[in-house]
Structures are given as C-alpha cells and as structure tokens.
Image (tube, coloured by chain):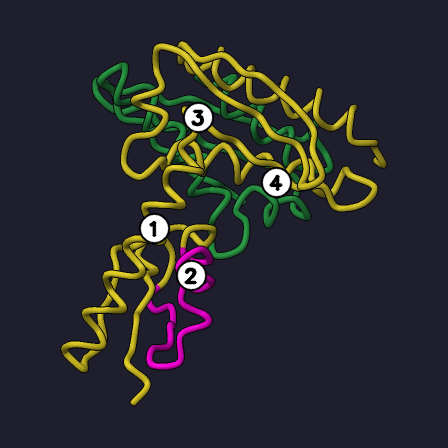
Amino acid sequence: MNLDREELAQKADEFVCEIFRRTNLQLETEVRLDEEGVKIDVSGQDEGLFLSDNARLLYAVNHLLNQIFYRQSRDGCNFFLDCNNYRRDRTSELELMADKAAERARLTGTGVSLQPMPSSERRIIHLALADLEDVRTESEGSGWHRRVLIIPSA
Amino acid sequence: MRELVESIAKALVDNPDEVRVTEIEGEQTTVFELRVAKPDIGKVIGKQGRTAEATRTILGAVGMKLRKRFVLEILD
C-alpha cells in the first residue's frame, strides 16, 4: 500500500477509535497533520488510565500505530499520540530531571541512573545533556527496564 | 475482547485472512491464543517482543477496568 498522509491520518484515527471502542475506554480523538507526521490528541473520562504508569498505554497504542501504518506510507510517516499535553509537560519534566541528575553526577563523581523509560523519553535525556562536556550519557538494561545512566567524564 | 486481539493482529499482518484467535475463559483469567500465517509471526511479536508487549499492555489496561486477567499467547 502507498497511502498519502490524509488517508493515513484517517485510517490511524479509525484504528485508535476502534481500540477504544472494543476496550470500553471512554476516550475521544482529534486528529491533525503537521510536518512531523500524524498527531492524534486523546481526551475523555479515562485519561487517567491512559496516562497511568508513565503513559504505558499511550506508548503501547502509539507503537502499534507506527508498526501498522509506517509501512503503508509513501514517505515514512510518523505517528504521535498525545493526551492532555502529556508529551510537552513530560519533556520539560525530563529536561529538569536530566539537569538534576547531571548535577548529582558532577558532585558525587559517580554514575547516576534514572528510572526506566521508553526510547522516546531516553532520547530527550540524551539530547538535553549532549552539549555538556563534564558528563556523558548511556542506556543500560533491556525492554521495559532500559534506563539512562549519566556518567561524569573526568 | 477476542475481537480486539483479532483487529490488532489483522492490522499488523500481511495475511489478515489467516488470523485465528481462540478464547479460553477461566474464572479470573482469560487466555487468547493467537495464530497467524508463518511469515507474519515476526510482525505480531515485533523487535525484542515490543509489539506483543504493546498488545499485552492494552489487554492489561482493560483487565484492570474489568478486574480480570488477560493472557496473550502467540502460537506457531
């Protein structure tokens, strides 16, 4: 299949709505397109469940979207689910977490490991600290346990 | 719930007609056995099992709402 972005956005939205319907989750979607890809904003009564446990459910549905629809796209379209500005708020939270951990690594001279996170969140940490010369970052562990380690470079 | 597993699997594979889901219902736990065409097994499991994991996460969330446990088994 070789679908353009409007068709993909519509099919992805239908898929997400189907999951919500079949799971009885009281959630609605709003879909839009921008230069990054297809954005689907989720809202409704079950937001709390959707975002619980570091938004496990949000990331799970997002993973399925990418698996199903990326290969149907002509030019490699990405999909981003969001709910209640979770991604934006989480980004600032992660950047703050990264700064604090870097400070602690510097002061103690030992590696500091953060809590396990999905790859998209680890990426934010790596990027936030990429320009610092006195610490470097690595990921360790596998699957749901994979976490960022911040190491003083001295 | 069987339909949920079926829709997800059918969307992931190249041969949706060969997707079979059987439901084995227990008192607290319901097991879903998923069978797909051989070349499609990788698609429902995913790299490092991430796609299977995502499907299980969705089942887990619903299970929490319904106070039931759902198990997904992928058979070949």
Q: Are marks 4 and 3 on the same chain?
A: yes
Q: Amino acid at mark 3?
A: Cys
Q: Residue at x 62, y 21 (%)?
A: A31
Whether residue A148 appears in magenta in the rendering, the answer is: no
- The foreground one among B1 and A70 is A70
**Colour of chain B in the rendered structure image:** green
Q: Can you say whether A37 is above or below B2 in the image? A: below
Nearer the N terminus, badge 2 or badge 4? 4
Badge number at residue A83: 3
Q: Amino acid at mark 4?
A: Asn
Nearer the N terminus, badge 1 or badge 4? 4
Q: Residue at x 65, y 46 (%)?
A: B38
Q: Amino acid at mark 1?
A: Leu
Q: Are marks 2 and 1 on the same chain?
A: yes
- Residue at mark 2 to residue at mark 3: CA–CA distance: 23 Å
Residue A24 visible (yes or no): no
Identify the residue under disc 2.
A128
Badge number at residue B49: none
**Chain of the residue displaying label 2:** A
Q: Residue at x 59, y 50 (%)?
A: B42
How packed mark 1 is, by other alpha carbons closer than 10 Å (few <14, some 14-19, many 20 or more), is some
Label 4, secondary structure: give it: helix
Q: Are marks 2 and 3 on the same chain?
A: yes
Q: Are marks 2 and 4 in contact (CB under 8 Å)?
A: no
- Residue at mark 2 to residue at mark 4: CA–CA distance: 25 Å
How packed mark 2 is, by other alpha carbons closer than 10 Å (few <14, some 14-19, many 20 or more), is some
Identify the residue under disc 4.
A66
- Residue at mark 4 to residue at mark 3: CA–CA distance: 17 Å
